[in-house]
Image (cartoon, grey):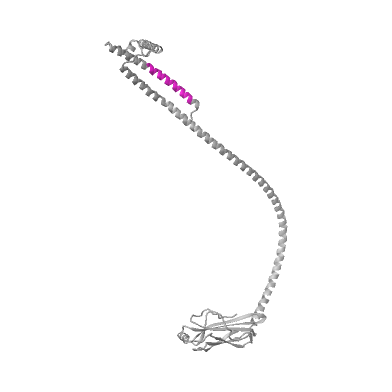
Amino acid sequence: MISVKTFRVTITLYMKKKKRIHHHAANKIRAFLSTKNVEAKHHEANEQPPETTTEQHKRNGGTGPFGQAEQQTFNGERAAEQGQRQNGNSLPLPPRRNQISRFSNWRYLKVRKWRERWPILIAFLTAVFIFWQAYIYNEQRKIMNKQREVMDAQLGTMNGQLESMNKTLAETKKGADAAVKASDAAKDSASAANAAVDQNKELIKAAKVQASTSQTAARAAAISAEIAQESQRPSLGIFESTLLELGVGKAAHAKFTLRNTGSIPAQKVRAVTTGWLDTQSCPEIPPIGVVVGIPSEASIPVNGERISNAFTGRPITEADMKLIDAGTQWFYVYIRAEYEGRRGHRYAVEYYGRYNKGVVAFDLCTSHNGSN
């Protein structure tokens, strides 16, 4: 960047140089015009034109910019012109030729004058650019100063936080030291406790051996009791199923024989039966309606038998009979008997089948056929 002092020195030197150039050009123009005036006067008087400026300069020995004689003539004419101006008299107009020549030279001076001023314009624009850059630089410095203030404030906040963290760290360190001391004391106590624990482990092992022996004996006794109990229980089964009626206009009828093959009588025996016609293969058992069979909770002795009957809820029609004969409809029966043994243990037995007219017997379905 150019400083203001350097700019001023540059402008001053340029103005001095321009002043010297203008002064030298003005002297040359005045000498040229005086020569042209003399030539015009001789031409009007039909006289021989005087010597040229170069010849006069050579003849006079090259003294001065135009020679001594020309310089004296020029000085005299200049003094006369100044005197006439002071007295208020107007100067005589030069010939047309001289006027055109003078106009052309002044125009040249004017153009030359503007051509010589362009460095000033450049210097001025440079100064404006420098001042503009300085203004932008100052604005940027202001913004940077504000940012620095904000950063200083943030730094102060961070320093405060760091101090508080250091304090917290110191307190934590104190707590950690105390915890280490307590841990050392606990280790000593733990070593003593471990010795006692080892002794207790030995005692516990011995107690576990004794307990395992006792548990084994208890399990053996329980298993023996369960075996004895299972061997002393009633057991009902359905040993016979017989079709008694299957004709048009009558309800289908079948009977079942319950037999106790257990070692003790079956108490509180309750049997429920049902029968129905269906075209599906072993469908889900419908809800049981009216109970038919043993009317109350009776008992069946060892090797004793009881009879239970199953009926359809409606008479068989001719259409039903045709389907039964064709093998697309069956007579289904279901019986469930529940009973008790010793100590109130409950048992049950189920039977689910359908009558097959082709083999004249009941076929068992895949579900609801079992006992416990």
Q: Main secondary structure of the magenta part?
A: helix
Which residue occupies 33% across, 11% down?
A: 56
Q: Nearer the viewer, residue 219 or 56?
A: 56
Q: Nearer the viewer, residue 143 or 171?
A: 143
The answer, for residue 349, to whether it is visible in the render is yes
Q: Exactly how many numbered labels are in the figure? A: 0
Q: Position of residue 237 (x, y in %)?
A: 59, 84
Q: Nearer the viewer, residue 300 or 41?
A: 41
- Looking at the image, residue 208 lies above or below residue 168: below
- Looking at the image, residue 323 lies above or below residue 69: below
Q: Is residue 15 magenta?
A: yes
Instruction: State the image quarter where residue 289 is shown.
Output: bottom right
Is residue 120 found left or right of 36 in the rendered image? right
Which residue occupies 44% across, 20% down?
A: 16
* The residue positioned farthest toward the left in the image shown: 46
Q: Position of residue 296 (x, y in %)?
A: 63, 85
Q: Is residue 193 magenta?
A: no
Q: On the rendered image, what quadrant is the C terminus found in?
A: bottom right
Q: Which portion, as a residue range, is magenta? A: 7-27
Which residue occupies 66% across, 47% down?
A: 168
